[in-house]
Image (tube, rainbow, N blue to C red):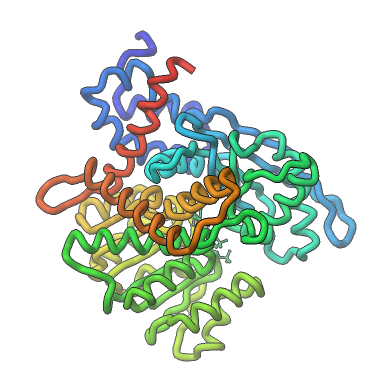
Amino acid sequence: MAVTDHVDLNGFMEGVKKRNPHQPEFVQAVQEVAEDIFEFMEDKEEYHSQQILRRIAEPDRVVSFRVCWEDDAGNIRVQRGWRVQNNNAIGPYKGGIRFHPSVTESVLKFLAFEQTFKNALTGLPMGGGKGGSNFNPKGKSVREIMRFCQSFMTELYRHIGADIDVPAGDIGVGGREIGFMFGQYKRITNNFTGVLTGKGLEWGGSLIRTEATGYGAVYFLENMLATKGENLEGKTAVISGSGNVATHAAEKIVQLGGKVLTLSDSGGFIHDPDGIDQEKIDWVKTHKTHRRGRIEEYVEAFPKATFHAGKTPWGVPCDVALPCATQNELLGEDAKTLVANGCRAVSEGANMPTDLDGVHTFKAAKILYAPGKASNAGGVAVSGLEMSQNSERRSWKEEELQQMLKDIMSGIHNSCIRYGDQGGGYIDYVKGANIAGFKKVADAMLAFGVV
Ligand code: NDP
């Protein structure tokens, strides 16, 4: 059989599994996209003959490197760092850096693959990448984190650049870590350039970048509810996570008249039947981000709430749900529980928080369900706007940026409708996002020939 002959979805996925052994997260992400793309490609011979999906599912390159650093006790510690540059057909590689003990090559390859479609959906010229390390920032002193970030950048700097690859933050990497990494990049290269996003406002950062992912996920939710003539006023929301994305999603829900019932971390979730208002959200931000505390301590500050150790919040009845912690945190059974309890809409703030069973459950129930690549694209969108501001050597005003973020989220919503409208009032947002993102990247790749 010539390699250009058609294979079916199963044949394609067998090849992906064979080429990527022991990489379940990456295989899962490819499967979710391939399920929609095979149907879309059925009558599009050029995509088949040019092996476009197979090429997108093979990263342009994966760089793996040693990161040595010295802890406060003088011990030498060795970690592994990676940068996955998945695809730069429509712009420089772009995607966050994650520091978490669960980081593996498989996790970063899945994130870089997803990022390729997400970035295409924003309408901005950004390719897809992702990086990180199995370094665990929890319990480390600020000096240890600084030394780690400097060592990480001492290798990473040779692979990135404002027109090559522009990393940002992700789990375990916030403004402070971006500062340490940018400082080291500048020191090594003597080059003040927009090589990272999520920078501080005094040194090239953009207004609303911090809020953008969580706010964007709620704007997307509003767009979905509007297709049913509804809004967030008076609706109950269940949210997982208590980091950057979760707290800003909660903030926007409250601003739009909704009531947030839960937040969580890797230790369990808190349920506050009175609602988590702005004052409580501010407490969580300070407690989790600045003091690096645990969410269970919320119940000491707000005694009407309860803490549920080792559990996820999906059993709490709600109108809308926003998984905003990590991948595969909402499983098939959780999806069934949400649907049975009357949940009408799910907007993913995290990347791939719902497993394949859960995705199939939401689709079968025909509820409003937005995959992260569509609903959490607000963060990378404002990162793209930060890149533009850096190139222009200007800072745009907050109102302009807020409006651009809203417009971009509505634009992504429209793209999902364009390719995901199944008739009878049902929009398959997963299909819509996959096809719209794929088409843009695929058409650019066709223009470049076999590279
Ligand atoms: P943060 O590090 O700020 O927060 C992560 C939150 O998730 C914490 O509450 C953390 O709890 C919890 N968490 C992490 N791992 C687990 C786990 N295995 N089980 C349960 N809870 C867990 O990260 P972000 O808020 O930035 O990122 C959250 C998600 O959103 C990720 O999937 C990320 O890829 C995605 N995302 C982020 C963007 C951004 O702009 N920041 C952009 C687009 C997507 P604990 O404190 O106990 O670790």
Q: Does 291 sit left or right of 6 as displayed? A: right
Residue 144 vertical position relative to residue 274 in the rendered view, above or below:
above
Q: Residue at x 32, y 78 (%)?
A: 257
Q: For this rendering, which residue is in front, 116 or 356?
A: 116
Q: Residue at x 58, y 37 (%)?
A: 84
Q: For this rendering, which residue is in front, 269 or 43?
A: 43
Q: For this rendering, which residue is in front, 361 or 377?
A: 377
Considering every residue shown, the one lying at the far left of the view is 424
Q: For this rendering, which residue is in front, 330 or 182?
A: 182
Q: Residue at x 55, y 88 (%)?
A: 301
Q: Does 429 sit left or right of 280 as displayed? A: left
Considering every residue shown, the one lying at the far right of the view is 74
Considering every residue shown, the one lying at the far top of the view is 2
Residue 298 vertical position relative to residue 449 in the rendered view, above or below:
below
Residue 239 vertical position relative to residue 60 in the rendered view, above or below:
below
Can you give x and y, in whole percent of width and height, for residue 405 in the image? 40, 56
Can you give x and y, in whole percent of width and height, for residue 187 in the image? 80, 46
Residue 10 visible to an observer of this rendering: yes
Can you give x and y, in whole percent of width and height, for residue 410 in the image? 31, 54
Residue 333 visible to an observer of this rendering: no
